[in-house]
Amino acid sequence: MTTDQQPRVQWLGRWGFVLAATGSAVGLGNIWKFPYITGEHGGGAFVLVYLACILAVGVPVMMTEIALGRRGRGSPVDAVRRVVMESGRSSAWSLLGWMAMLCGFMILSFYVVVAGWSVSYLWKLLTGSLAGSGVDDMVAIFVANNENPLNLGFWSTLVTLATMLIVGKGVQAGIERSVSWMMPGMVLMLLMLIGYGVFSGGFGEAWHFLFSFNAGSLSSDGMLVALGHAFFTLSLASGAILTYGSYLPARTSIARTTFSVAIADTLVALMAGLAIFPIIFANGMDPGEGPGLIFMSLPLAFQAMPMGTLFGILFFVMLSMAALTSSISMVEATVSWLCDNKGLSRRAAAWGTGIVLWSISTLAMLSFNLGADWTLAGRHVFDWLDYLTSRWMMPLGGLGMVLLAGFVLKSETFRSELGLAPRWHALWLFMVRYVSPLGILVIFVDALGIAHV
Ligand code: PFF
Ligand code: NA
């Protein structure tokens, strides 16, 4: 039974939702993942497809999710069920909510490992253990950091604990309070880092790599990666944005907040690319290095630069905070579902979720050491979690969401939630009915090799 009697909590401050949703969106996806997948898929053409996916799919899906959350005032499962029943449609659609919750959970299971890398590099810089290392040393240090399961497990456990501590305190006292100082802090650190980067030079090649769209043709696999990343980077189809939307006050404009979040997220990703690729090229490193890319390149650059250790520390503090403001959003859906349906307190729900999460993330963590051979079809646990969520679950969940909004629910639901002027509403409807679903389908069909675009 859900506790429908109690009105749902809402964000306390005017900026509560925007800070929390931007905190969710801006994370490891922007600074760790975007640069390395761009490197793996050849640069410019990939970036162009990615930007198109943000605009044609990401923005309409985000508006839909926030509206569903606010209308249904519940976790993804409960909110979707209420909204479809209000329109007299099948409650089977709440499967979309289940998939989203599962997806957020699976993402977090590998996300805490990467966030753990960030915190461990912060520690390395603070203790000076990177001083004097060259390119080869940096590679060796990254490998060594992963080799010992106790070491790696320690850092990811720390991130899990911090996440659950914040979420356990509740929406206002935990999530809203922490983002209200971490987000301004991150912006400040980012601005300082950009100012620092401008003086370190070496911009040209990176700019060319990111924005020259004739960089060869993009594979259909690359297109699927770009689509998946558009979902990942905006925290879509994983329960995060929908649940945050369920705390949104009735008056807030959904379109306006969606654009703020999407623009901030895109800017941070592009800036991260412009900060990281000059270093890669200047040191003759391989842009297709993979997940270890920023952890090998950046510390190298920092220690060769004046005041580098200081700015390196600043960078990893910022990255760790970016990760934490995202990780809390990934469990909020599950925690809110447990509280509403199982009568648990926030604290109990958070620690219960944390224990399950810790077990799965430990399996993901072991992919880098003891479990390096536990592979299936060439992927170990860490890769599977990433692959299944980004390439399949998020695009499929997003497809379900736009079809639900465009064809299944009563149009009045979105007319009143979105509150747009008629021609803007018509544009949104056109996007969710045709542009977003067709975009997702074309990329799927192409990637499955059924037909090629
Ligand atoms: N948007 C986050 C990032 O770019 O790092 C990742 C993320 C957060 C994905 C929350 C999914 C989610 F529910
Ligand atoms: Na992001």
Image (spheres, helix red, strand yellow):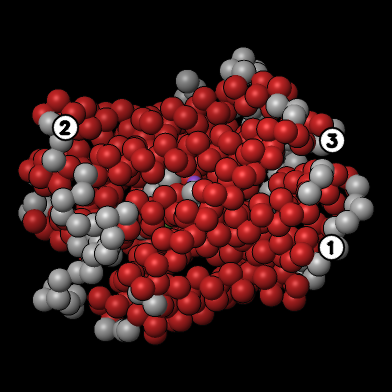
Marks 3 and 2, the one that precedes in the sequence: 3
Residue 59: image location, x then y, percent:
34, 37
Residue 427: image location, x then y, percent:
21, 27
Marks 1 and 3, the one that precedes in the sequence: 1
Residue occupying the point 62% across, 74% down: 157
Residue 75: image location, x then y, percent:
28, 65
Kindly identify which residue carries mark 1.
Answer: 128
Q: Amino acid at mark 1?
A: Gly
Disc 2 packing (10 Å; few <14; some 14–19; many ≥20) = some
Name the secondary structure under disc 3: loop
Q: Is residue 133 left or right of residue 157?
A: right
Kindly identify which residue carries mark 2.
Answer: 425
Mark 2 Cβ and ligand 1 under 8 Å apart? no
Give me the C-alpha separation between circle 2 and circle 1: 55 Å
Between label 3 and label 2, give the one nearer the viewer. 3
Kindly identify which residue carries mark 3.
Answer: 283
Between label 1 and label 3, give the one nearer the viewer. 1
Give me the C-alpha separation between circle 3 and circle 2: 50 Å
Marks 3 & 2, CB-CB < 8 Å contact: no
In the image, residue 442 above or below residue 83 = above
Q: Quadrant of the N terminus?
A: bottom left
Residue occupying the point 34% across, 51% down: 18
Residue occupying the point 81% across, 45% down: 306
Q: Nearer the viewer, residue 34 or 262?
A: 262
Between label 2 and label 1, give the one nearer the viewer. 1
Residue occupying the point 52% across, 48% down: 187
Disc 3 packing (10 Å; few <14; some 14–19; many ≥20) = some
Q: Amino acid at mark 3?
A: Asn
User: Is residue 366 something that shows in the picture?
Assistant: no
Q: Is residue 40 left or right of residue 413?
A: right
User: Is residue 436 something that shows in the picture?
Assistant: yes
